[in-house]
């Protein structure tokens, strides 16, 4: 009996190890879902298999007026919030346009009345704000 157990024990142990390392289909799906989304490759390590993802290209210049308007200005100028002249309202824009583009752009950049500096768009450049003002003026003429 001892000889039979001595022969079967390694066989049973090998079978148990093999079944423990093999995952059921459900367990494999779970293991696939919880894989890390990225791996860090530190200088000096073998990173040959690492994929390099290029950074998006930087903008080549200031955004256009309509793009800036849609991103930063429309919340107030489409609704008239806090007394903002609405886009396309000729009567509201005419007296402002009469003051000149330089004044309009200066007010837009520095803030005026209830409007904060740059309309609250801290990431916008002065050129982009000027483009947005030109766009708004063009809509009211």
Image: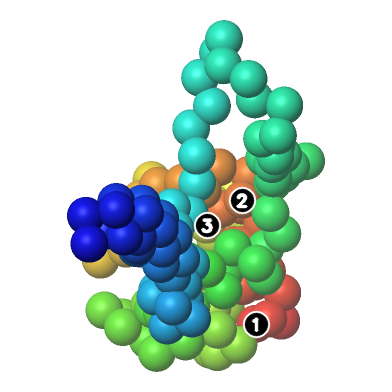
Quarter holding residue 116? bottom left
Question: Where residue 128 is drawn, which disc sits there?
Answer: 2
Front one among 57 and 77: 57
Q: Tag 3: Cα neighbours inside 10 Å, few (<14), some, or many (≥20)? A: some
Q: Is residue 15 above or below residue 128?
A: below
Q: Position of residue 18 (x, y in %)?
A: 44, 60
Residue under the point 46% across and 65% down: 22
Q: Is residue 1 above or below residue 85?
A: above
In this view of the protein, can residue 32 be seen by the observer?
yes
Question: Where residue 104 is drawn, which disc sits there?
Answer: 3
Front one among 105 and 18: 18
In this view of the protein, can residue 21 be seen by the observer?
no
Tell whether 16 sits left or right of 44.
left
Query: Can you tell which of label 3 and label 2 is closer to the viewer?
Result: 2
Front one among 116 and 26: 26
Per the model, the C-alpha gap separating discs 3 and 2 is: 13 Å
Q: How is the image coloured?
A: rainbow
Which of the two discs, 1 and 2, labels the residue nearer the N terminus?
A: 2
Question: Where residue 1 is drawn, which disc sits there?
Answer: none
User: Mark 2 falls on what kind of element?
Assistant: helix
Which of the two discs, 1 and 3, labels the residue nearer the N terminus?
A: 3
Residue under numbered circle 1 = 140
Query: Can you tell which of label 1 and label 2 is closer to the viewer?
Result: 2
Number of marks drawn: 3
Q: Position of residue 104 (x, y in %)?
A: 52, 57
Q: Position of residue 129 (x, y in %)?
A: 56, 53
């Amino acid at each position: 009996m001892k000889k039979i157990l001595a022969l079967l024990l390694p066989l049973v142990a090998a079978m148990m190890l093999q079944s423990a390392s093999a995952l059921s289909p459900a367990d494999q799906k779970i293991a696939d879902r919880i894989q890390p989304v990225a791996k860090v490759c530190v200088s000096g390590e073998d990173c040959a298999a690492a994929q390099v993802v290029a950074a998006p290209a930087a903008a080549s210049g200031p955004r256009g007026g309509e793009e800036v308007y849609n991103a930063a200005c429309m919340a107030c100028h489409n609704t008239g919030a806090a007394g903002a002249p609405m886009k396309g309202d000729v009567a509201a824009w005419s007296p402002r346009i009469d003051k000149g583009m330089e004044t309009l752009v200066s007010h837009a950049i520095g803030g005026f009345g209830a409007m904060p500096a740059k309309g609250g768009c801290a990431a916008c450049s002065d050129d982009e704000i000027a483009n947005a003002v030109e766009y708004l003026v063009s809509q009211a003429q």
